[in-house]
């Protein structure tokens, strides 16, 4: 018995003795106080039972007759009830809390059972602990086939390492921005096919300890299909842009040239002061020509094909700067020339990103940074504008723009990844990484 | 019964117990009633300094029971909802008195205007 209990036992024994000696209500009140104090110190009912036992033994030692013994035991019983009552007050409290908990668990169960996403829990050794009914609808497996089994075989072999990484990160509660918006994993279904899933995971906490993970997996087959469609759309768009750029540059350019010649002919037959005004018009025409050329180059920059990404981005930045007043710098270096699909993709991405800055950011400065390290090219586009809530935008359904999705899709096409760091009020950074020098056969660079 | 100090609490408990015992409540119920009186009277001594506790037998719908009223002209309770929450205490106490008493007894009424005192009425029916 520890010191605290021993002191309480002594006090309790004294009060019991008092009660046996006729102490009445005050002694009972003391028993009640002792119970209250035990509760306040975080002791339990079993501790109080120990105290009671000790005090009763002590009282029995002073007993000489059988009648005295019976009296002592009876009194001790009454005493014990007094001491327990504070516990009774809080005991019911925990019962009520339990009832509330059960109720909320039932409500939670209802949500889980009717959810359209797969909701699952995994133990700390990677076993499937629970799956909701929609798992069966989506995968064709019965839940019984997986409960208690290792989760890894459910994931396509190519994605298993990433799945394990996600699992470990959740299990150790390491919030990684990489995993925040979900990880795409191929899920093996019963028919033998693989369906694309997007998985998020958080630690499962019981009594302050992480006992596993709670995950949500969404079937993104439809989204994948939409992305595929977007991919084709991008390709078609690229063709169309090429056509328009040509029309602007060649056809409109030639027409303007003819206008120039026509004007020059007319000017010859006019008095000098009128010819001068015509020359002013010619100057305006020159400006239009210049702008048309710039626009056509921005649309489909021959500079990109001729000189590479960096000069093309500088050219683009210059044009956007002049139109919008944004201060745009292109920094760093992409090193040697990159594969054409990568250059085109990055050019279009920066174009879209700058459009977003113009439309949404209310920024004054933008920097575009290219850095090459080994087999990877990083491109960061940073603005000092209002920023945005990335999660909220990702979660938008229906009315969401195609810009960021398009950026994602283009990167995907060249094997790259995107990270968006943005906080409302704190500007926006798009950080992209594209692998270089990969075997062309294994990546889908063909475009 | 006036409540001014700890000794008054003891006599209030005793009166309550006697009355309940006359009414025929079982021993464990006597302890419950005494506990309710303790908690309410303690609050008077601690928060209002002075007040009173009234214990009487009551009858309703053929049931017999005991009613404890604790009233004072003290500072009153600023936020009753909070005061009835488990663990809420403005004095660093357990915050168990009001919610615990409410659970122990069959009926519980708390009237308090901030600045105008507090009145708690609780009842326990015989089963
Ligand atoms: N640089 C930025 N600064 C602030 N908000 C941005 C930025 N880029 C994107 N956004 C936010 O992200 C949303 C999605 O962008 P996007 O997919 O390009 O669609 P859209 O531009 O058509 O709205 C925008 O509506 C905007 O709220
Ligand atoms: N008679 C009273 N007069 C004023 N305030 C009171 C009175 N009784 C209770 N209170 C307030 O209600 C709170 C909760 O009371 P209670 O549940 O008994 O817990 P505790 O006494 O441990 O603080 C007290 O901290 C006090 O602020
Ligand atoms: Mg956009
Ligand atoms: Mg109290």
Image: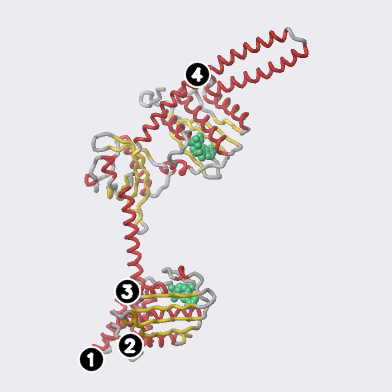
* Crowd band around label 1 with a 10 angstrom C-alpha radius: few (<14), some (14–19), many (20+): few
Point 38% across, 79% down: residue: B36
Q: Chain of mark 2?
A: A
Mark before the other along the chain sequence, 4 or 2: 2
- Closest to the observer: B54 or A379? B54
Quadrant of the rendered structure where residue A150 is? top left
Q: State the separation of the CA atoms marked 2 and 3.
A: 20 Å
Location of the N terminus of chain A (image quadrant): bottom left
Provide residue A272's location: percent of width, then percent of height. Answer: 77, 11
Left or right position of A203 against A352: left
Left or right position of A270 against A381: right
- Closest to the observer: B14 or A31? B14
What label does residue A47 carry, if any? 3
- Residue designated by label 4: A243
Provide residue A187's location: percent of width, then percent of height. Answer: 30, 38
Name the quarter showing ligand 4.
bottom left
Quadrant of the rendered structure where residue A75 is? bottom left
Mark before the other along the chain sequence, 3 or 1: 3
Whether residue A258 can be seen here: yes
Q: State the separation of the CA atoms marked 3 and 4.
A: 87 Å
**Do tag 4 and tag 2 residues touch (Cβ < 8 Å)?**
no
Compared with A294, B114 (above or below) is below
Provide residue B112's location: percent of width, then percent of height. Answer: 49, 75
**Do tag 2 and tag 3 residues touch (Cβ < 8 Å)?**
no
Q: State the separation of the CA atoms marked 4 and 2.
A: 105 Å
Q: Nearer the viewer, mark 4 or mark 2?
A: 4
- Residue designated by label 2: A17
């Amino acid at each position: 018995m520890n010191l605290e209990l021993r002191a309480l036992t002594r006090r309790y024994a004294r009060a019991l003795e008092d009660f046996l000696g006729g102490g009445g209500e005050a002694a009972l009140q003391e028993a009640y106080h002792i119970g209250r104090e035990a509760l306040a110190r975080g002791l339990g009912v079993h501790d109080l039972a120990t105290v009671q036992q000790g005090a009763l033994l002590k009282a029995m030692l002073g007993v000489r007759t059988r009648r005295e013994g019976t009296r002592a035991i009876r009194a001790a019983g009454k005493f014990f009830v007094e001491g327990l009552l504070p516990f009774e007050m809080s005991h019911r409290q925990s019962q009520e809390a339990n009832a509330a908990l059960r109720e909320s668990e039932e409500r939670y169960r209802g949500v889980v059972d009717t959810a359209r996403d797969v909701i699952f829990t995994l133990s700390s050794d990677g076993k499937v602990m629970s799956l909701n009914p929609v798992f069966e609808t989506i995968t064709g497996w019965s839940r019984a086939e997986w409960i208690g089994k290792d989760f890894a075989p459910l994931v396509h072999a190519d994605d298993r390492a990433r799945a394990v990484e996600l699992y470990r990160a959740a299990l150790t509660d390491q919030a990684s921005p990489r995993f925040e918006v979900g990880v795409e994993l191929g899920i093996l279904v019963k028919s033998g096919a693989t369906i694309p899933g997007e998985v998020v995971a958080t630690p499962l906490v019981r009594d302050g300890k992480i006992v596993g993970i709670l995950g949500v997996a969404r079937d993104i087959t439809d989204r994948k299909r939409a992305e595929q469609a977007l991919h084709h759309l991008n390709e078609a768009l690229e063709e169309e842009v090429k056509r328009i750029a040509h029309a602007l540059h060649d056809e409109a350019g030639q027409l303007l040239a003819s206008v120039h010649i026509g004007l020059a002919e007319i000017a010859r037959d006019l008095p000098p002061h009128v010819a001068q005004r015509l020359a002013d018009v010619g100057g305006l025409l020159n400006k239009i020509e210049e702008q048309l050329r710039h626009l056509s180059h921005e649309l489909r920059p021959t500079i990109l094909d001729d000189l590479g990404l960096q000069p093309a981005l500088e050219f683009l930045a210059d044009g956007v700067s002049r139109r919008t007043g944004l201060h745009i710098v292109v920094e760093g270096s992409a090193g040697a020339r990159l594969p054409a699909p990568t250059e085109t993709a990055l050019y279009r991405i920066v174009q879209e990103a700058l459009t977003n800055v113009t439309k949404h950011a209310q920024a004054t400065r933008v920097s575009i940074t290219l850095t090459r390290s080994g087999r990877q090219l990083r491109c960061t586009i940073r603005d000092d504008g209002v920023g945005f809530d990335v999660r909220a935008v990702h979660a938008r359904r229906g009315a969401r723009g195609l810009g960021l999705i398009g950026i994602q899709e283009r990167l995907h096409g060249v094997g790259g990844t995107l990270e968006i760091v943005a906080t409302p009020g704190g500007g926006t950074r798009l950080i992209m990484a594209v692998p270089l020098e990969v075997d062309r056969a294994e990546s889908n660079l063909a475009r | 019964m006036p409540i001014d100090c700890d000794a008054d609490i003891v006599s209030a408990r005793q009166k309550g117990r006697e009355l309940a015992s006359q009414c025929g409540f079982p021993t464990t119920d006597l302890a419950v009633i005494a506990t309710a009186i303790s908690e309410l009277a303690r609050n008077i001594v601690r928060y209002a300094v002075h007040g009173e506790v009234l214990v009487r037998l009551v009858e309703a719908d053929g049931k017999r029971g005991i009613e404890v009223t604790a009233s004072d002209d003290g500072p009153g309770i600023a936020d009753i909802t909070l005061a009835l929450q488990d663990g809420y205490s403005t004095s660093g106490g357990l915050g168990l008195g009001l919610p615990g008493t409410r659970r122990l007894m069959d009926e519980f009424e708390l009237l308090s205007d901030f600045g105008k005192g507090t009145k708690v009425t609780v009842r326990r029916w015989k089963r």
